[in-house]
Image: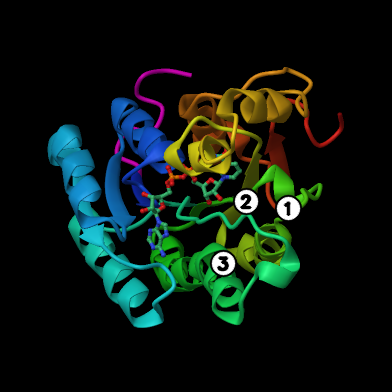
């Protein structure tokens, strides 16, 4: 890998205001890319784009809103002069036993975590084709490979986005477009922290989570960004339709 590995590669990144998406944006820019950042959190997104300077543009968008996604991807493609790479990071968690999951909760988790990536992919495909090919990385979860309790909606949505990407990879291959998923384990981000900080004894809850992982630790967002950028560049040129667990060993442990 060189500091210029992604030189002039044009990225659309959702969920780019925080956590894994923000780490991907920073690392892509450090390696020479231009990035169209999408997120629903306008303030955090603006701050992220400002920090990245002229290589980044910020587009506020809820990925579950089809019309907004269409307009946002078109705006990003216009600003970037095309699209070579899509990274779908936007996502939400829901920690509750099934009988406490209301219809609206269920629908929201599927809308953001499954329909959202589909909408972004569908809007970006013409641009990737026009660029002569490209890459899509959907950030799923280890919870889409191996279940967790009290996360039926989240696990179902993440398993869905893994299979969505596999199916799309077959359709998109003739156009030189590769589609892969990355499946994170526990990553130190605001989304992850909420899963244990509200416990009665947060440090105990965190230790219980660590014990699920062969590596017995939580990842830094940059460790996920490395895998996502690998699948977004030339070094992974023969990889498509895969779901890469970057999960400290949880899904086999
Ligand atoms: N952190 C973990 O431990 C972990 C583990 C497995 C999978 N993941 C997945 O990684 C992805 C990134 O999560 P993170 O941990 O960086 O979380 P995060 O909360 O730090 O970042 C998620 C970002 O997505 C944005 N977002 C949420 N809903 C949106 C919507 N409807 N439209 C646009 N933007 C929206 C948020 O505003 C936020 O900026 C998610 O898909 C998550 O499910 C995270």
For mark 3, give the secondary structure. Answer: helix
Nearer to us: label 3 or label 1: 3
- The numbered mark, 3 or 1, whose residue comes first in the sequence reads 3
Residue at 77% across, 51% down: 149
Q: Is mark 1 within 8 Å of ligand 1?
A: no
Q: Which residues are magenta?
A: 1-9
Q: Is mark 2 within 8 Å of ligand 1?
A: yes
- In front of the other: 247 or 147: 147
Q: Which residue is mark 2?
A: 140
For mark 2, give the secondary structure. Answer: loop
Q: Are marks 1 and 2 in contact (CB under 8 Å)?
A: yes
As drawn, 134 above or below 98? above
Estimate the x, y position of residue 175 in percent, counting from the top left.
56, 63
As drawn, 62 above or below 86? below
- In front of the other: 46 or 230: 46
Neighbour tally class for label 1: few under 14, some 14-19, many 20 plus, Cα within 10 Å: many
In the picture, measured across the screen, residue 98 lies left or right of residue 129, that is right
Report how far apart the C-alphas of labels 3 and 1 lie in the structure.
13 Å
Q: Which residue is mark 3?
A: 109
Query: Mark number for residue 244?
Result: none
Q: Which residue is mark 1?
A: 144
Q: Is residue 126 magenta?
A: no
Q: Are marks 3 and 2 in contact (CB under 8 Å)?
A: no
Residue at 61% across, 73% down: 106
Residue at 30% across, 26% down: 30
Report how far apart the C-alphas of labels 1 and 2 lie in the structure.
7 Å
């Amino acid at each position: 890998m060189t500091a210029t590995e992604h030189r002039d590669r044009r990225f659309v990144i959702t969920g780019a205001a925080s956590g894994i998406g923000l780490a991907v944006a920073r690392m892509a820019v450090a390696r020479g890319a231009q990035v169209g950042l999408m997120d629903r959190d306008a303030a955090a997104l603006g701050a992220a784009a400002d920090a990245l300077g002229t290589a980044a543009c910020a587009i506020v968008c809820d990925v579950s809103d089809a019309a907004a996604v269409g307009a946002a991807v078109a705006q990003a493609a216009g600003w970037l002069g095309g699209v070579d790479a899509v990274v779908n990071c936007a996502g939400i968690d829901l920690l509750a036993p099934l009988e406490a999951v209301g219809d609206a909760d269920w629908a929201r988790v599927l809308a953001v975590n499954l329909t959202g990536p589909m909408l972004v992919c569908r809007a970006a495909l013409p641009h990737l084709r026009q660029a002569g090919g490209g890459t899509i990385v959907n950030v799923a979860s280890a919870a889409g490979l191996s279940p967790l309790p009290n996360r039926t909606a989240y696990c179902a949505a993440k398993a869905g986005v893994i299979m969505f990407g596999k199916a799309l990879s077959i359709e998109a291959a003739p156009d030189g477009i590769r589609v892969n998923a990355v499946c994170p384990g526990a990553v130190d981000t605001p989304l992850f922290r909420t899963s244990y900080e509200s416990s009665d004894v947060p440090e105990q809850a965190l230790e219980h989570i660590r014990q699920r992982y062969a590596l017995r630790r939580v990842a830094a967002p940059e460790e996920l960004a490395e895998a996502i950028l690998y699948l977004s560049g030339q070094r992974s040129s023969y990889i498509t339709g895969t779901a890469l667990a970057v999960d400290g060993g949880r899904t086999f442990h």
